Image: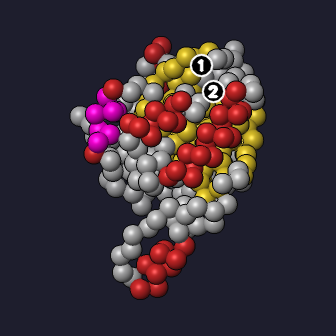
Amino acid sequence: MKLLVVGDIVGSPGRLAFSRVAGRMKATGAVDAIVANAENAAGGKGITSAVGEELFAAGADVLTMGDHTWDQKESWSYFDREPRLVRPANFAPGCPGHGVVTVETAAGPLSVISLVGRVFMNPYDCPFRAADAILSKGANLARIRLVDMHAEATSEKIVMGRYLDGRVTACVGTHTHVQTSDERVLPGGTAYLTDLGMTGPRDSALGRELDSVVRMFTTGMRESFKIAKRDIVLEGAVINVDDKTGRARSIKRIRESIES
């Protein structure tokens, strides 16, 4: 299986980049399956059912979320209706939706687990225990397993990757919107990257227009952050997987620009 994992999609520019780049890669057979983080896909905050359906139509097999999961109240019921939309598994019991899904892809079944970190984040349940609980039910999971670790601290992501090494096919980080250069296959066969990066406008502050962010930092006053529009890219990684063992053979970062 050739698996494309896509960094945080930010607003309409990010959705445009996803549609053009990821859609083309899937249509041409460059990748067999696509998993993308969509927690900033609706105007930079959360997701809506319309945005989710747009991304699925563009080629996404699974969409993962993070700390902005509940920003769009309209979408809360969507999490129960759409099994391919996965919110962090370590959210409190009783939240809508689910933290793991197994889907059929062109190259076979794929399980996706979503987790959210706790360092410099809200006080969520333990992501390590949540991962253990899911993986202990291995009979319900596919051989190929991807974890999206949505976290602020690089240390927490690194430790999660090592903690899961040999138990999942890949553990990739999202949330910081800045792509790291530490991709590797860990000793147990798990592909790892601390952060996939951002799918959206690079001429920005994490996808937002620079002027308003500068004013916030220099004055301390609240600002309304609009989505930037220039230098639009898709960032992520392509993971080549041994279908028989579920181990990663390789992981390669990608960054591809589009004409807006």
The residue to which callout 2 is attached is: 33
Going 48% across and 74% down the picture, which residue do you hit? 213
Res. 226 in view = yes
Residue 105's label in the rendered image is: 1
- The amino acid pointed to by label 1 is Thr
Looking at the image, residue 216 sits to the left or right of residue 190; the answer is left
Image quadrant in which you'd find residue 23? top right
Viewer can see residue 66:
no
- Which quadrant would the N terminus be assigned to in this image? top right
Q: Earlier in the sequence, mark 2 or mark 1?
A: 2
Q: Which residues are magenta?
A: 74-80
Residue plotted at (61% across, 42% down): 18
Can you give x and y, in whole percent of width and height, for residue 130 in the image?
A: 39, 35
Callout 2–callout 1 Cβ contact below 8 Å: yes
Question: Residue 39's x, y, as percent?
Answer: 45, 46
Does residue 123 show up magenta in the picture? no
Q: Residues within 10 Å of mark 1 (few under 14, many from 20)?
A: few
Is residue 76 shown above or below 12?
above
* Element type where label 2 sits in the image: strand
Q: Is residue 120 above or below residue 2?
A: below
Whole-percent x and y of residue 103?
A: 51, 20
Q: Quadrant of the image for the C terminus?
A: bottom right
Q: Nearer the viewer, residue 247 or 256?
A: 256
- The residue that appears at 34% across and 55% down in the rendered structure is 122
